[in-house]
Image (cartoon, grey):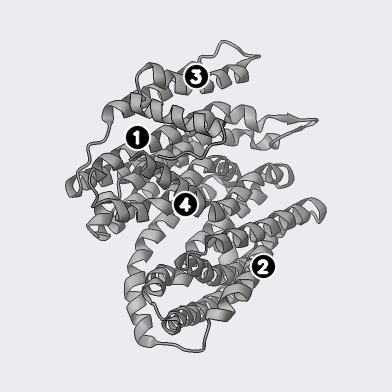
């Protein structure tokens, strides 16, 4: 059992690292943005990224999900080429129509999405990036279908490196501001498209097209759109309403806090990559329910430690001095106020991911559509009310409320479809240590040594879990064996 749990988390790392690297770059670039861009300029960037994540859903038509299913199910190379070419041509046709529509309505969209002061060039770049994104997703999903993890990884790393270099050039050397940062994204996506074309598309693509196959794939892929759309809307409602209700500058502040809190979202994403296939492969095995319960406990332990660590250290981190400079621009310091709340929302969403087991096994995916739709409605109403009362902190709490509604609903549904006896006592002990650690940090009597005190508290976190009996004896014994083998350079065997 312990080996299966380790296998799951290893797969989470392997499958997630390519996609996560690009998001991690966005996290790493935040200090540069806060020194180079004004709050309003960064607000435009934040909104632009959210709109791309939303609009690309309509470009893909759910065919990316269909590609993995139908491509994998096809044994003959000729049939695989037909699947690839039908999807590629379909997405290309839809993408060209939508991109041209955006180009022809650039002034109206620029005003509606960003405000009258924003240059319409940001909409032109968005249209081009959406086209490239839609086509790149086809290539990347084909690599997944062929289990070419190494190719997926190095393409992601290479394009991410191009984006990093160009972003630094446009912001620091060319001083092109927000528009320069957007051009960096366009050129990195174009570079990725070129790489995928050279190593994949030109070998898989033929001018063959099947309307009957397209119809079948759309029937499979279109039902995924509502759920994906709901997730994307959850990521844009808060920023859009902040712009409307309290201004573009506050979008920049909130967006900075959101990126700082991204570390838990990245952990969730990596876990999700391996979690769904793990459920399918494991649910029918003996003791599967006990295994799922233990995974949830370990998942909460890891994610709670990350949550607690960042909650305690986020303020000292952004104010960290590097010579005469601070890590973040002073006008962005207030962004840290929303980080713990946003990280709490990611922690709750991680619980939601753990509760999908019953719905996934029973293939009742329509529940995801209903729950996600309710989550979006709750997020919209909560943001509308709380932003006017609490500003950006209200937007962060609205996200917590929406994810909590979704997670609680899915928990009870999962218990009805596939009952799991979670380790509630251990989870309670974990919650106690998290709460106590944060309270002690808030009551710190050491002003000058505050950061050191917080580091001591973080280091004491696993010790506190040990002292209150969170860890079982066999887990400690197994961990001791693994650490001993690693320290001696011996490959560990279960």
Residue at the location (68% across, 56% down)? 161
Where residue 191 is drawn, which disc sits there? Answer: 2
Q: How many residues crowd mark 1 within 10 Å: few (<14), some (14–19), many (20+)?
A: some
Q: Relative to the observer, which residue lies in front, 87 or 312?
A: 87
Q: How many residues crowd mark 4 within 10 Å: few (<14), some (14–19), many (20+)?
A: some
The secondary structure type at the circle numbered 1 is helix
Residue at the location (36% across, 70% down)? 221
First of labels 1, 4 by sequence position: 4
Give the residue pinned by disc 4: 235
Q: Is residue 138 above or below residue 3?
A: below
Percent x, y of residue 226: 35, 62
Give the residue pinned by disc 1: 297
Q: How many residues crowd mark 3 within 10 Å: few (<14), some (14–19), many (20+)?
A: some
Give the residue pinned by disc 3: 460
| Marks 4 and 2 close (CB-CB < 8 Å) | no
Q: Is residue 122 above or below residue 343?
A: below
Percent x, y of residue 412: 22, 43
| Marks 2 and 1 close (CB-CB < 8 Å) | no
Q: Is residue 488 left or right of residue 461?
A: right
């Amino acid at each position: 059992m312990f080996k299966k749990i380790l296998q799951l988390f290893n797969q989470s790392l392997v499958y997630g690292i390519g996609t996560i690297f690009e998001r991690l770059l966005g996290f790493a670039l935040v200090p540069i943005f806060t020194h180079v861009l004004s709050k309003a300029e960064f607000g435009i960037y934040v909104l632009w990224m959210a709109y791309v994540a939303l609009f690309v859903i309509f470009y893909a038509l759910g065919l990316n999900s269909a590609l993995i299913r139908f491509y994998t199910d096809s044994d003959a190379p000729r049939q695989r080429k037909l699947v690839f070419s039908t999807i590629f041509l379909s997405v290309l046709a839809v993408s060209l129509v939508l991109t041209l529509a955006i180009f022809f309505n650039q002034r109206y969209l620029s005003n509606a999405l960003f405000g009258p002061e924003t240059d319409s060039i940001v909409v032109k770049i968005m249209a081009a990036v959406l086209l490239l994104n839609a086509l790149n997703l086809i290539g990347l999903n084909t690599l997944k279908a062929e289990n070419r993890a190494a190719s997926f990884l190095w393409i992601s790393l290479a394009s991410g490196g191009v984006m990093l270099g160009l972003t630094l050039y446009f912001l620091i050397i060319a001083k092109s501001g927000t528009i320069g940062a957007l051009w960096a994204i366009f050129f990195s996506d174009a570079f990725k498209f070129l790489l995928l074309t050279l190593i994949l598309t030109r070998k898989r693509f033929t001018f063959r097209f099947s309307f009957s196959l397209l119809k079948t794939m759309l029937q499979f892929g279109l039902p995924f759109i509502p759920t994906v759309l709901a997730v994307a809307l959850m990521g844009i409602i808060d920023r859009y309403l902040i712009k409307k209700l309290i201004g573009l500058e506050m979008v920049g502040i909130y967006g900075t806090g959101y990126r700082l809190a991204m570390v838990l979202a990245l952990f969730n994403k990596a876990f999700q990559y391996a979690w769904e296939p793990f459920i399918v492969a494991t649910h029918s095995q003996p003791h599967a329910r006990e295994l799922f319960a233990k995974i949830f406990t370990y998942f909460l332990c890891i994610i709670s430690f990350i949550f607690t660590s960042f909650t305690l250290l986020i303020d000292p981190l952004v104010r960290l001095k590097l010579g005469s400079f601070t890590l973040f621009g002073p006008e962005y310091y207030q962004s840290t106020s929303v980080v713990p709340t946003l990280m709490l929302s990611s922690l709750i969403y991680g619980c939601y991911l753990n509760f999908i087991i019953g719905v996934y096994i029973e293939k009742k995916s329509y529940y995801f559509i209903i729950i996600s739709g309710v989550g979006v409605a709750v997020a919209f109403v909560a943001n509308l009310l709380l932003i006017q009362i609490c500003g950006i902190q209200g937007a962060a709490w609205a996200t917590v409320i929406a994810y909590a509604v979704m997670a609680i609903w899915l928990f009870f549904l999962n218990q009805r479809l596939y009952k799991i006896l979670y380790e509630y006592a251990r989870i309670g002990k974990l919650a106690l240590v998290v709460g106590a650690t944060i309270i002690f940090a808030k009551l710190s009597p050491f002003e000058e040594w505050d950061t050191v005190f917080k580091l001591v508290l973080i280091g004491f976190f696993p010790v506190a879990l040990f002292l209150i009996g969170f860890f079982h004896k066999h887990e400690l014994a197994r961990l001791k064996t693994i650490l001993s083998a690693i320290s001696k350079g011996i490959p560990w065997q279960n």
